[in-house]
Image (tube, grey):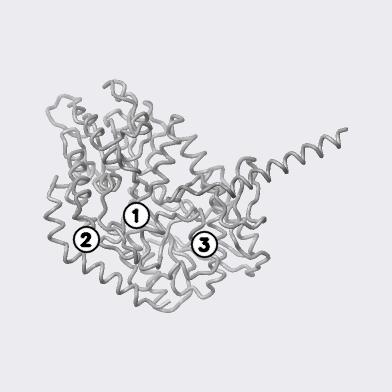
Amino acid sequence: MQKFKSIKILSLLIIALLFTLISCSNEPNTENNNNNITENQPVNTDDNSVQETTDESVFEIQPDLPENMDFGGFDFRILVRYYASENHTAYQARDIFAEEENGDPINDAVYRRNRYVEDKYNCNISQVLAEDHQKRLSNSVKAGSDDYDLYYTVFYDLSIDLTKGLYADLNSFPYINLDAPWWDHNAKDSISIGGKLYFCPSDLILLHNDSSSAIVFNKKLIKDYQMDDPYELVLSNTWTVDRLIEMTKGVYKDLNGDGIMDKNDLYGFACYRDAVMSIVHSAGGRICEKDDNDLPYLTLGTETTYTAFDKAFDLMYAPSGYNIHKELEAQDPLFYSTAENMFMNNQFLFYWILLHDIEKFRNMDSDFGILPVPKLTEAQEKYGSTVNRYHGQALAIPVTVQDRERNGIILEALTAKSKYTLIPEYYERTLQRKVSRDSESEAMLDIIFNSHVYDPGYVYNIGEYAWDIIMMTMRQNRDIVSLYEKRINKANKDIDKLITALGNLAE
């Protein structure tokens, strides 16, 4: 009788599994943006492509890679950006290498992922941390040396070195499937040029997610000022820039009564100077978009973008606005920490951040919530979460890599495995359960991660607009039209040079 029960239970489990697989294979893919951290759509239809994990509700998609490969202990070397400055420690790589398990969820997920790939392919994963990482890679490529297998640094570094011929087109590597769900499709579609993609973030790393733009709000101050629940505004599709301006404009107060509005006082909206491009992007504005040939063209001068800038300036330049770079950077070397403490001390109603900052609010007494950056209008289809070009990072492969098949296999294996090891620890058990304070944050994080913006004009700093726009906020300058017209010839030349230079690169 016991044997019969076991067989019956096993049969039911098999039927349930088959039904789930059939349902998944027939479900249409309606989401075009696809760094969806919780998405589990298959990359191929082979029966062996899906493997059940310990969670009965999740199935691990297997990459289409050869089995029984033995790389003879090959050392897969990853060159990683590193800076010792205290203001940069939040954006140091914690996702590439782990010496051993130590109880930290992220560290242990990285360790287990690397060991899995090392054991499967008889290889070794190692990192080279270097402050002079750009120089090292440049010297290596110039010497024709196969010194590094992967390069991990910020978009800023990657973009300014792009035309030097240091990186290989990711499309040229066997076994790297950029359409797979573990690669950031928003980045792939936005920053490729003429069908070539020289760097891209994936689930192997976290710093593009950490560098996603978001807004946190102080629930105590929302209650004190008897305001609408911001979560309800998002869910009812009424979370717009105008609504944020309306909610913040009357919130500023000289708390210590000294007649000076400074770091000791209360503000409705606080942000860093980088927020201007984030607000514009979520409002639908772009410096550049791309044509049918996958080539960038200027859109900074469009009505939508101008309107988005006007709203961003209205929000940031109001008396209730506090530009942290403008007010604190020159006088306080630890201005990031000072601003974070101001939020935790109930001095900011809304605070524009990069998502990595959320972990710093873990011990905050007052409750806070997490929001996407608002849209321009209710009719706008999607929010936009800018991945910061100065902190957000991506992966590139040095052009000097000799064995592209081996490189592609190891990188794809690491990236695919990360989706089921690193990303759940980061997303579900670190952000959702340990840091966020409420159940609503889960839906907000989904919106943020699924709406990454990689404006090619911003990423590649076409016409040097990106930097100059950010610096406009330090002077509370609103004249975006003059800046656009002043730099339009340079911007178009930059686009032409970029396209020509990439077209001439040898693979």
Query: Is 36 in front, or is 223?
Result: 36
Horizontal side, residue 464 vs residue 128: left or right: left
Residue 390 x/y as whole percent: 32, 54
Specify which label sits upstream in the sequence, 2 or 3.
3
Residue 271 x/y as whole percent: 26, 40
Horizontal side, residue 435 vs residue 386: left or right: right
Residue 57 x/y as whole percent: 61, 40
Q: Amino acid at mark 3?
A: Asn
Position of residue 327 relative to residue 68, above or below, is: above
Q: Quadrant of residue 13?
A: top right
Horizontal side, residue 64 vs residue 31: left or right: right
Mark 2 vs mark 3, foreground winner is 3
Q: Residues within 10 Å of mark 3 (few under 14, many from 20)?
A: some
Q: Amino acid at mark 2?
A: Glu
Residue 464 is labelled as: 2
Query: Is 181 in front, or is 47?
Result: 47
Q: Secondary structure at mark 2?
A: helix
Residue displayed at 77% across by 40% down: 10
